[in-house]
Image (cartoon, rainbow, N blue to C red):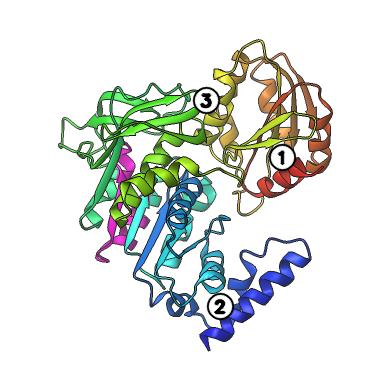
Amino acid sequence: MLFIYKLLAKLIRIASKMVGKKGTDLPGKIIRKFNNNILKDLTKNFEEIVFVTGTNGKTTTSNLIGHSLKNSGVEIVNNFEGANMLDGIISTFAIQSKKNSKIAIIEIDEGSIKKVLQYVTPTKFVFNNFFRDQIDRFGEIDTLIETIGTELDGKNIQLILNSDDPFVTRLSKYGVNNIFFGIDKNAYSFQDTGITESKFCPKCNNELTYEHIHYSQLGHYNCLNCGFKRHDVNYSVTKAIVNPLISLSINDSEMFTTSQLGDFNIYNMLSAYATLATIGLPKSDIISGLSSYTSNNGRMQTIKHKDEKVTLLNLAKNPAGMNVSLSIANSMDKNIKLNYLLVLNDNGADGYDISWIWDSDFEILKKQNIKNIVCSGKRAKELALRLKYTDIDVNIIVNENIKEAVEKLKTFNETYNIAIPNYTALVETQKELESK
């Protein structure tokens, strides 16, 4: 019977793509109607199931891990397209798994953890970070972490944790044989992203003492009141250079250069390295995989156009992610003019509450040489209003139609563009940017 469900899922996927859809969630949604326990059945013979989550970077981290394993000839299941809720995860297993598939690397939406863990318990669970994100879906960070902790409790899952984030370290009590990763104090100087989630102890609520801050609440901390502190790490970035590609040394090893842009990806590279090493992939294979990975999923993706213009595309769906995206051009030559495309929807998967754009530091743009900013998506007018309050002297264009907004962007003479869509706007924005 499992064969029939897999075949049905593949046929639904093909039909969905024929009508111009991605078909990442629909197969799972339909076969779940026939068998509500289908995910449990699909995963029962896997030896290693690794879940990857966190507010920012989970797609990139999951894909880095998946690519590195595939690059080493390991047969895996991996939702590389980012279908990270229950139906998307079911689709991934139904369509990709084969008789010899024993390892799965699965990105999972933070809000879907409770639902998915009803059917499958991962062997390992990677947590990158926690920032405010879609509060109407997830609630405040404390509420989200309490919910996740309850689901992890007693399941004997090995946790792979970003020790630099006190919110993540808080989960350590729910895991077994945990692995910790972090960045050394003097390894790299991050740009100020202008957002601080909390610097209070998640255990006793007293203010944390920081020896060093990388950005936001991420850094080296301890609580003088209760003793809560950054856990000693198994894997650390001991040196990193971004120029503009990331080069890094882990545990004082020889530096290697990646194809990744944006200093926030240092954490994603480290997270992937720690996970691959914990799985048992040889160090040479890990470095080969991490060095050769290139993004094509809207996360720091470079799109080159026929007229030699270049657009850098990066998803942003919360204040921390937006600030990082807005900071990308800070390292560019100030004589180079550029344009922006900002796209904001408020569909269900985005969260209906877009007040987070007022917590984002759009004032970062005042330091850059910008000619035009195009605002698009269902909430384009709110984006334009937010920009007005930055008092930035640029030409602002509002067009809610994403296709038309991208066409407008392509008419500008400047060589460099930066496109920042939120979650449901990403696919259409990417499609139009890549079109002729």
Q: Tell me the SS state at disc 2.
A: helix
Q: Please rate how many residues cluster around mark 2, counting C-alpha atoms within 10 Å: few if below 14, some from 14 to 19, many from 20.
A: some
Q: Nearer the viewer, mark 1 or mark 3?
A: 3
Residue at numbered disc 3: 244
Residue type, label 3: Pro
| C-alpha span from label 1 to label 2 | 34 Å
Which of the two residues, 279 or 147, is positioned nearer the viewer here? 279
Mark 1, other Cα within 10 Å: few <14 / some 14–19 / many ≥20: some
Q: Amino acid at mark 1?
A: Arg
Query: Which of 211 and 302 lies nearest the eye of the viewer?
Result: 302
The residue labelled by disc 1 is 379
- Which mark sits nearer the N-terminus, 2 or 3? 2
Q: Which residues are magenta?
A: 145-168
**Quadrant of the rendered image containing residue 334:** top right
Q: Mark on residue 214?
A: none
Residue 210 is a magenta residue: no
The image shows residue 239 at horizontal and vertical percentages of: 33, 27
| Residue 427 place in picture, x, y as percent | 68, 49
Amino acid type of disc 2?
Arg
Report whether residue 163 is seen. no
Residue drawn at x 27%, y 66% is 155
Q: Quadrant of the C terminus?
A: top right
Q: Which residue is mark 2?
A: 32
User: Disc 2 versus disc 3: distance between alpha carbons?
Assistant: 45 Å
Mark 3 burial class by Cα count in 10 Å: few <14, some 14-19, many 20+? some
Query: Left of 144 or right of it: where is 377?
Result: right
Q: N-terminal of the two: label 1 or label 2?
A: 2
